[in-house]
Image (cartoon, rainbow, N blue to C red):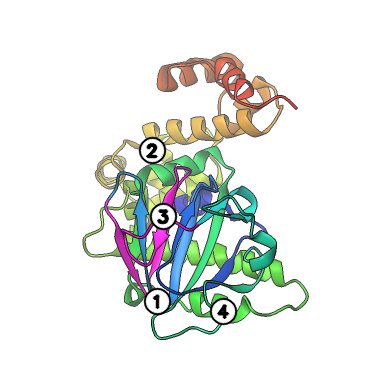
Amino acid sequence: MDPLGDILDGVRARTAAFCQAVLDPPWALRICDEAALGLAAPLHGHAWVVPDGGEPTLVEAGDVAIVQGPAPYTVADHPGTRPTVFVHPGNRLITADGTDITAATKLAATTSAIGFGAEPSAGSTILASGVYDVSSFVSGRLLATLPTVVHVPRDRIRSPIMDLLHVEVGRDGPGQQVVLDRLLDLALIATLRAWFARPAGDPPGWYRAHGDPCVGRALRILHEDPAKPWTVAELAAATGVSRAAFARRFTELVGQPPMTYLTHWRLDLAAESLRNSEATLAAIARQVGYANAFALTVAFKRVRGTTPQQFRAGLADTVPAA
């Protein structure tokens, strides 16, 4: 798998969390669902995405915005419109006076309306939205490269995914939720590809390097088998260039020497296992390419400033008691 694939592997659409609403002005939704990532895509009309303390972003029909959480933000017809509906975890909809309107609107499951009915008028906005869980520690690499709001105009997204979502959301066939979740995952991938590829873009080094015939192949090799005791010479031979040329090219494109990149990737994978499994430190060390628990502990402490045991204990401390 390539670096973007590995990093996106832990980002998944939440079940039953894609919806479509018809909104008549003035309208404003306060998003406080604590999702790691949210998607907002007007299919008709427009929307303003207003992060707390950030600049409002105008999103026109056909555009897609990916908003980074879990901090609250507002989606509205105008930056100055006060929220009338608050979207809480589980897609619970609460009005400004505290009334729960989740069941009435059925916004969590199907096409629905907030305001004046399900038929759009000239000034209405049809807003498609969805949220994503980020369950993988390594996906933090992706979040660290993104601004709070990723806005991609329609003409930059060379994919029919949003059109397919628009068609599918109103259907009720077998496996429909799986279809919607997978389309929403693809919408995220298409949006991020367009974002990184834009002329003014500044994508991370691992993304830029993916298209390089030499370094891109080396990255795929490292991600497919990170536990192998790689050397710069072996990677150079696998990519068909000299050792010096390979090391220079890799560092230039990725921003790190090959072995430094590999170390950080191994430690990301180790942190992922520490977070999501009960495997022993010795087993995790072998999985990510270290001879034993001591070697992994030394590397983890040197790079991350804490030991694997302390890292795992800190994660346990953040889990609420049952």
Which amino acid, by three-letter code, is at mark 1?
Answer: Gly
Position of the C terminus, as image quadrant, is: top right
Residue indicated by mark 1: 62
Image: magenta residue range: 55-84
Residue 166 lies in the magenta-colored region:
no
The CA distance from mark 3 to mark 2 is 52 Å
Residue 74 lies in the magenta-colored region:
yes
Residue indicated by mark 2: 233
Q: Which residue lies furthest to the left in this view?
A: 200
Residue indicated by mark 4: 117
* Residue 138, image x, y percentages: 51, 40
Which amino acid, by three-letter code, is at mark 2?
Answer: Ala
The CA distance from mark 3 to mark 1 is 19 Å
* Residue 89, image x, y percentages: 60, 48
| One can see residue 14 in this view | yes
Which element type, helix, strand or loop, lies under badge 1?
A: loop
Q: Which of marks 4 and 2 is in front?
A: 4
Circles 2 and 1 in contact, beta carbons < 8 Å: no
The CA distance from mark 2 to mark 1 is 48 Å
Q: How crowded is mark 4: few (under 14 residues within 10 Å), some or many (20 or more)?
A: few
Q: Residue at x 56, y 15 (%)?
A: 310
Q: In this view, does 223 lie above or below 168?
A: above
Q: Which residue is drawn at 21% across and 60% down?
A: 200
Circles 4 and 1 in contact, beta carbons < 8 Å: no
Q: Residues within 10 Å of mark 1 (few under 14, many from 20)?
A: some
User: In the picture provided, is 245 more to the left or to the right than 237?
Assistant: left
User: How many marks can you see?
Assistant: 4
The CA distance from mark 4 to mark 2 is 66 Å
Which mark, residue 74? 3
Q: Residues within 10 Å of mark 2 (few under 14, many from 20)?
A: some
* Residue 15, image x, y percentages: 67, 58
